[in-house]
Image: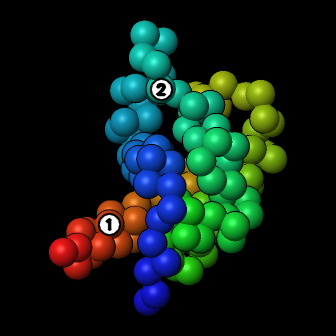
Amino acid sequence: MIDHGIALPHYRLHVVPAVVALASPTWQREVWLDPGEFENLDYVVHVLFDDFCDAHHPEAWLGQSLRTEEEVTLMARLGAAYGTVQDAVGADAADEVYLASPHWHDVVSAAARLAQVLVGNDHAALTKSP
């Protein structure tokens, strides 16, 4: 594994928690479905697809907010899984509809694997720091 580093560490500070949120059904139910909370699915989608990465085409983010080719591959899988759900329920569907989709489990699974790799790679990079 080659760690290409991250030129935009402040971007990564948004990407990692967004992926972790997608990996946690409990967080999704308790936070996203609470109208009093700031974070919802729309926020997470903007982080991962618009603002700090492009989960549909993450290759350009290698060395920017993604460290390794594995992260790029797993982010693309997450983007594809999310796209499948979005295509099935519609882009304007409520968070509850996304979470109830029979394909939502694929999003959670893809995010869980990516979260493990992101956090593991960050930990490895910290342990190699001078």
**Mark 2 surroundings: few (<14), some (14-19) or many (≥20) residues within 10 A:** some
Left or right of residue 14: residue 93: right
Q: Nearer the viewer, mark 2 or mark 1?
A: 1
Q: Residue furthest bottom?
A: 1
Q: Which residue carries the number 1 mark?
A: 122
The one nearer the camera, 57 or 113, is 57
Rendered view: 20 above or below 66: above
**Mark 1 surroundings: few (<14), some (14-19) or many (≥20) residues within 10 A:** some
Mark 2 or 1, nearer chain start: 2
Residue at x 56% of width, y 80% of height: 69
Residue at x 23% of width, y 78% of height: 128
Residue at x 40% of width, y 26% of height: 31
> Toward which corner of the image does residue 117 lie, by quadrant?
bottom left
The one nearer the camera, 33 or 4, is 4
Q: Residue furthest front?
A: 130
Residue at x 45% of width, y 72% of height: 5
Say what secondary structure mark 1 lies in: helix
Q: Percent position (x, y) of residue 47?
A: 58, 41
* Residue 39 badge: 2
Rendered view: 101 above or below 78: above
Rendered view: 44 above or below 122: above
Label 2 close to label 1 by CB (< 8 Å) = no
